[in-house]
Amino acid sequence: MQRNVSLDVLKLTLAVIVVISHAGVLWGYSDLGYQLTVQGLFRIVVPIFMMVSGYFFISVIRSRSLMTWLKKVVAMYVFWMLVYAYFWIDVPALTPYELLKVLRVAVMGYHHLWFLSALIGAAIMLYALRHLSLKALFGLALSLYAMGMFFIYAGHYHLFAGTPLDALFNEIWFYRNFLFFGFPFFCTGYLLRQWETNRRDSESRHYYRRFYAIWSLLGALLLLGESYLNYVGLEGLPAFDMYLSLLVFCPGLFLWVSSMHVPGDSTSLAYYATALYFIHPLFISLFEALSYRQGNTLALLALASSLAAVVLLKGSRKRLGFAFGG
């Protein structure tokens, strides 16, 4: 099976970044370094995962096979939610509030599994809107992301301090979902695929690759700058899932890597990336239970253990294909 190996290498790299980010690499070592990486540059992971999924979703739209795609992704979501059930099914008191909290996690996803929940919602939404023009889809994606950006910045900077809106805007689930986060990047991936399809074959691929590289570099600098400004403005280590500069950096990086177009069979790399993403919180929780705190040591232990587990599970990939997107 011919794949674009460069994209699978990117996905594996991003999966490694997820592991060390969740384990708190640089925590307690350098506050500024932590802010510019874990809370800055490393925030590209989920947006690019969403874009890659949207990029290949064009085949689902063309073949009208949404239900087949949904069965596959929903099966992954249910499996991993059950794997992590111990961590999120916790009802200290049988009150409507506590039950609603559990229901919200069940629908929106535990910890890192919110990605799958947002992916499912974004895909359904794009499929329903597939007959809109590309300009309309772009405008909608941009508008929804702008709304999410407003919510997160209003919450962090307490623009509505003392009101219920302040509490609402500081709830992660309110903006980190399929509508304000998932759809904008998923749709961006789809639009980039459409743009590549409509581009003239005679245009120089080498020229575009250099353009994408410059685009990526400028986007990275913007992301570092935005992260630093928030670090100074909030006088601490603010956790921002959404940055304005992600709209610049992520598409540029994706196009640059995709334009390398190294054909080959990289299904193993794709498996490692997916498995690493889903399994790593188990090892982070294990080492935290053994009194390891967030930081470089935990990041190294979690990454090494997760990689070892992924390699050992490779033999079961056929039987557990539904769990790893196989």
Image (cartoon, rainbow, N blue to C red):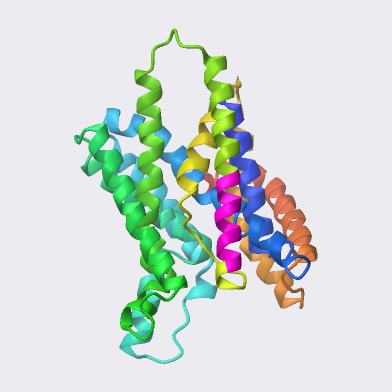
Q: Position of residue 309 (x, y in %)?
A: 70, 53
Quarter occupied by the N terminus:
top right
Looking at the image, residue 85 sits to the left or right of residue 72; the answer is right
Seen at 68% across and 64% down, the residue is 23
Q: Position of residue 110 (x, y in %)?
A: 48, 67
Residue farthest toward the top in the current orientation of the protein: 202
Looking at the image, residue 86 sits to the left or right of residue 154; the answer is right
Q: The magenta stretch spans which residues?
A: 221-232
- Of residues 40 and 90, the one nearer the viewer is 40
Looking at the magenta stretch, what is its main secondary structure? Answer: helix
Q: Position of residue 102 (x, y in %)?
A: 40, 77
- Of residues 183 and 216, the one nearer the viewer is 216
- Specify the quadrant of the image occupied by residue 117: bottom left
Q: Position of residue 263 (x, y in %)?
A: 59, 20
Q: Is there any visible trace of residue 322 in the rendered image?
A: no
Above or below 247: residue 3 = above
Seen at 51% across and 30% down, the residue is 255
Seen at 36% across and 47% down, the residue is 184
